[in-house]
Structure formats: C-alpha cells, structure tokens
C-alpha cells in the first residue's frame, strides 16, 4: 500500500515519528512536507498536494497532520474523490474506511499523542471497504453531491 503523509508545523513532530514507524512496517511512503519545522508555514501548502495525490491514485491513502487536524480535513475535502476526516479514536478510523471509503486520515498534532496516533493509523490502514449495499447506496449519493458541486 502506498501512503502519503503531510504536516505543517503543528503536526511536524508527530509526522516525523509516524513516518519512521511506517517505514519500519515496510509501507511505501511519500512525504509531502514539511521538510523542516517552520513556525510560519501553512497547512494548505502541504495537505493540498497530498489530497491531489490521493485523488489521482498516486497514493492509496493519506495521512495529514496539522495542529488540530481540522484545517487539514477542510483542505483535503476540497478535492474530488477525497474522503477525509479528523479522527481521534480507533473505531472511527476503521469504520470510516469500512463504511465510507475514508481515504485520507487527519490528525491533530497538538491534541493527540504518538501512541494513540499509531493505533489510529494502523486501524485506518488495516481496514477495507465492505461494499455492503447500504454503504454503496450512501456513497453513490455522496458522488452525486460531489459531482454537482464540482461543476
């Protein structure tokens, strides 16, 4: 599985920790920045390229980290085909993939610790969409909304 990861200054330290962890687990990882800690950087500069990569299929799943995770989720959801959510616990991490085809996980670097972040990431990465009719029906409705709003 190809994973993309991005963070601004608010998520930089957590991103570095998670990057190393994912490398140790033999995931293919693309780092969309930031490359260094810069307190004046802006989350859209890193999350937008990551979201484009998820939308285009360059990476299978993405992980975006900013201070709270809220800004990262807002930016990521501006891209057609991206289903991003701010996640703070493991149930939603796997359920979001299983039911809603979540493909970009957003975390708050200032509000979540590294151990919980690891558990959330692995719940997200190990989950698979179930394809149940009720879930697909809902996703089809989301696609209709998305197609109408991106015209």
Image (cartoon, rainbow, N blue to C red):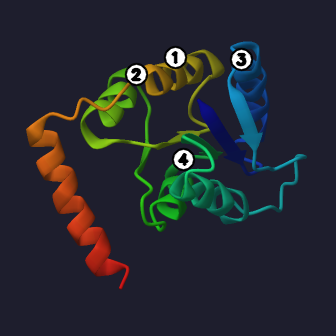
Q: Name the spot of residue 136 as percent of width and height, x first.
A: 17, 45
In the rendered image, the quadrant that contains the N terminus is top right
Task: Kindly report the distance in space between the C-alpha atoms of the residues bearing marks 2 and 3.
Answer: 21 Å
- Which of the marked residues, 1 or 4, is nearer the chain's N terminus? 4
Task: Kindly report the distance in space between the C-alpha atoms of the residues bearing marks 3 and 4.
Answer: 25 Å
Task: Kindly report the distance in space between the C-alpha atoms of the residues bearing marks 1 and 4.
Answer: 16 Å
Q: Secondary structure at mark 2?
A: helix
Contact between labelled residues 4 and 1, with CB atoms less than 8 Å apart: no
Q: Classify 127 as above or below 63.
A: above
Q: Name the spot of residue 42 as percent of width and height, x first.
A: 73, 63
Q: Could you tell me which residue is drawn at 60 percent across and 15 percent down?
A: 115
Q: Which mark is residue 90?
A: 2
In the rendered image, the quadrant that contains the C terminus is bottom left
- Which of the marked residues, 3 or 4, is nearer the chain's N terminus? 3
Q: Which mark is residue 26?
A: 3
Kindly identify which residue carries mark 4.
69
Q: Secondary structure at mark 1?
A: helix
């Amino acid at each position: 599985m190809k994973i993309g990861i991005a963070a601004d200054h608010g998520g930089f330290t957590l991103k570095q920790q998670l990057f190393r962890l994912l490398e140790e687990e033999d995931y293919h990882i693309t780092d969309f920045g930031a490359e260094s800690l810069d307190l004046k950087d802006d989350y859209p500069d890193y999350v937008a390229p990551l979201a484009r990569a998820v939308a285009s299929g360059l990476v299978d799943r993405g992980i975006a980290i900013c201070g709270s995770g809220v800004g990262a989720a807002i930016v990521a959801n501006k891209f057609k085909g991206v289903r991003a959510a701010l996640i703070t616990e493991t149930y939603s991490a796997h359920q979001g993939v299983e039911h809603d085809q979540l493909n970009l996980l957003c975390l708050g670097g200032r509000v979540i610790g590294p151990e919980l972040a690891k558990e959330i990431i692995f719940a997200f990465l190990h989950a698979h969409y179930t394809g149940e009719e009720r879930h697909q029906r809902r996703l089809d409705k989301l696609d209709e909304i998305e197609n109408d709003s991106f015209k």
